[in-house]
Amino acid sequence: MFTDTDSFYYSYTGDVTNSVQRQYYQSKNSDYATLPLWKKVDDRFFWNKYMLSELINTQNPLCDPWIVPVIQGFVQIEQCWIDTVDDAESLSAEGARFFQPPVHLPDCIGKNYTMILISRRSRHRAGTRYKRRGVDESGKCANYVETEQIFEYSSHVVSFVQVRGSVPVFWSQPGYKYRPPPQLDKGEEETQIAFEKHFSEELSIYNSQVIINLMEQTGKEKVINDAYLNHILEYSCPNLIYVSFDF
């Protein structure tokens, strides 16, 4: 169904499209628990939605178990442990060295914890590098990915979410040579409309955000870097913090 790629994931029992943070806030809605799985999903990451459209359009509860959302991205789950004094004593004879001193843990607390990494690629404006760039009229930027790091220890769960995507202005890199120079495709006024649509959605989903710009401030990328900064200044949103790193 999805060729031979290993980047598609699904679950019959859990929502893999929404971060732990969003699921927590959604669960406060009394109707949330009674919804079928596919009605809880984040539509941005529902990759097989079109394939299931006929079942979805029936609005028949009997179809709900057959509507299983699929995401594209990456998932890895690792069981880890905390180095304790007992571990240090058992390893010291072998000459093991620690970057940090081992910790003392009460007997009632376990040493094991779980680290989970989930990357969810948006189904909007997905494409190959150099061929899919910038933003569209609805504010969707190319190759958008939400990455969530989940730390689970005992009864505690912590989630950290970050997103990345193509710079949300109208731009492209025409040509087939290595790293073709980027160019702006539309004027400032038209671009500002799409730019604000993009960040309006971002702020509605994630609230305040810190923007990390990794583009070159000189050279080929300067034209896109300058346009990005100008549109941020024009937007003048107090819930956005802009930080630029020039490597």
Image: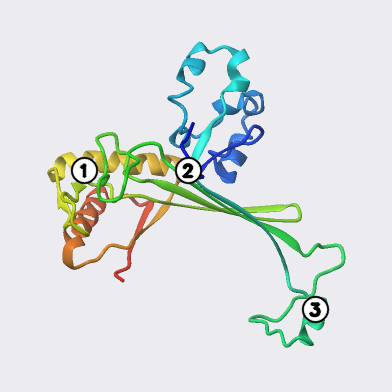
Q: What element carries label 2?
A: loop
Q: Quadrant of the C terminus?
A: bottom left
Kindly report which numbered mark, 1 or 3, lies closer to the viewer in this rendering. Answer: 3
The residue lying toward the viewer, choosing from 68 and 18, is 68
Q: Which amino acid does label 2 sit on?
A: Thr
- In screen coordinates, is 235 left or right of 11? left
Q: Alpha-carbon distance for marks 2 and 1?
A: 37 Å
Which of the two discs, 2 and 3, labels the residue nearer the N terminus? Answer: 2
Q: Say which residue label 3 marks.
A: 85
Kindly report which numbered mark, 2 or 3, lies closer to the viewer in this rendering. Answer: 2
Residue drawn at x 80%, y 70% is: 105
Q: Find residue 52 and report its horizontal and vertical position in percent.
A: 49, 22
Residue 149 occupies which quadrant of the picture?
bottom right
Q: Say which residue label 2 marks.
A: 5
Q: Is residue 21 above or below residue 28?
A: below
Q: In this view, does 48 lie above or below 205?
A: above
Q: Say which residue label 1 marks.
A: 192
Which of the two discs, 1 and 3, labels the residue nearer the N terminus? Answer: 3
Q: Which amino acid does label 3 sit on?
A: Val
Q: Alpha-carbon distance for marks 1 and 3?
A: 57 Å
